[in-house]
Image (cartoon, rainbow, N blue to C red):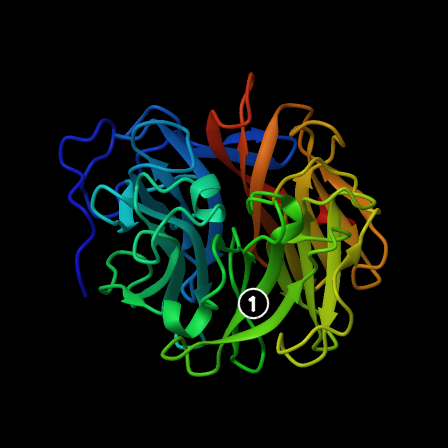
Amino acid sequence: MTSTKDTEGIEDAEVIEDAEVTEDAEVTEGIETSVPFEAGREGYASFRIPAVVATAGGTLLAFCEGRVGSREDFGNIDIVLKRSTDGGRTWGPLRVAAENGEHLAGNPAPVVLDSGRVLLVHVRNAAAATEAAIRRGEVSAADGRRVWVQHSDDEGLSWSSPTDITAQTKAETWRWYATTPGHALRLTSGRVVVAANHSLPPTGTDNGTEGKYDGGHCLLSDDDGRTWRLGYVDDNPSGYINANETTAAELPDGRVYFNTRNDSPAPGTRADAYSHDGGETLVKPFRPQAGLSAPVVQGSVLQLRDPDLLLYSGPADPGYRALMTVRASTDDGVTWHPAHTVDGLPAAYSDLVRVDATTLGLLYETGDFGAYETIVFRRIPLTALT
């Protein structure tokens, strides 16, 4: 295993094994919150794109992108993480899980295997390669979006060297590419499913930045991440539904439910689809899910088994990234209702995790005056959802 980046000299980050460096959780009416990441601290101008998993031993791993120089989606970006051994009340020192020199490593998609190993699927590209330039075809394959995987066998304390799996997971014609954001999925069969998205080359006079060239797909591994292949691919250049950032959950009957950000002008900003074969194919292409009122933004889904609830987290204001809300479905995603509203503040990306038998965890971007000031972890009693 390779060790994580040395954090010596980084503000507020003590390089002490699992030292707890954040303040105690704020408690309000049984709901506890803590702040693992705050913009402008610990050597990073901004923290974005949260993902969270619970290890086999119950440790929470909170991942995000640590953006060195700015809040932009390109530049020098690392995948950083913090560990919590007390259910998200406090967090240990910042660690770097994946880095790409002075370039970009981002879109963390972590998943915990039956063995306890934590896989981290993510993407890399050159620092100067913006999304628009990649979508226009102005970036070489070497400098564009590539897919990598690495693992940890000690619950996030150290990480293996990364392996490039682009040839197994990305069609040669695709330009833009992104995994999740948020946690990936391990099915009861043991299969790993990583929801992802891509863009197609344009036709006619288009330049490739148009939303209608967005498409969705997923990555599949049946051998704990040693080999990978593409599952379903959903392209729709007509522009009715164009899958973008996608999240997945396994329903109690074994179907896989996919929920996606929709960037096209179709009804609503969310769409969903189902798979009967573990993500190999979709029963039908993505269709509008107007029951989830939201701005254009990423969201997260999580299936609870006790109680039997499918949950979705994301901003609920239809026109602005604000009003973080957890919504619930008792009919496998057909209809939705609000289950827990956090507050009316700005808020953007999020991820859900089952903390323990009685607690849900929500890791999300928020702030008083903008959605990207902090990444907050919120412990929500399951009784608050029902």
Q: Answer with left or right where residue 161 lies relative to residue 176.
A: left
Instruction: Give the SS element for disc 1.
Output: strand
Task: Looking at the picture, tell me which residue is in the foreground, 259 or 177.
Answer: 177
> What residue sits right under mark 1 in the picture?
218
Question: Residue shown at 51%/62% (left/top)?
Answer: 184
Q: Position of residue 172 (x, y in %)?
A: 45, 67
Task: Looking at the picture, tell me which residue is in the foreground, 126 or 30.
Answer: 126
Q: How many marks do you count on the picture?
A: 1
Quarter occupied by residue 206 = top right
Residue, far front:
204
Question: Residue shown at 25%/49% (left/top)?
Answer: 100
Quarter occupied by residue 218 = bottom right
Residue 314 visible in the shown view: yes
Tell me if residue 180 comes above or below residue 343 in the rendering: below
Amino acid at the residue labelled 1:
Cys
Q: Position of residue 51 (x, y in %)?
A: 48, 49
Q: Answer with left or right where residue 282 lies relative to residue 155.
A: right
Q: Position of residue 145 (x, y in %)?
A: 39, 54
Question: Residue shown at 18%/43% (left/top)?
Answer: 16
Residue 87 visible in the shown view: no
Q: Answer with left or right where residue 168 lies relative to residue 369.
A: left
Task: Looking at the picture, tell me which residue is in the foreground, 310 or 204.
Answer: 204
- Pointer 1 local density, CA inside 10 Å: few below 14, some 14–19, many at least 20: many
Q: Answer with left or right where residue 152 lies relative to residue 192.
A: left
Residue, far top:
369
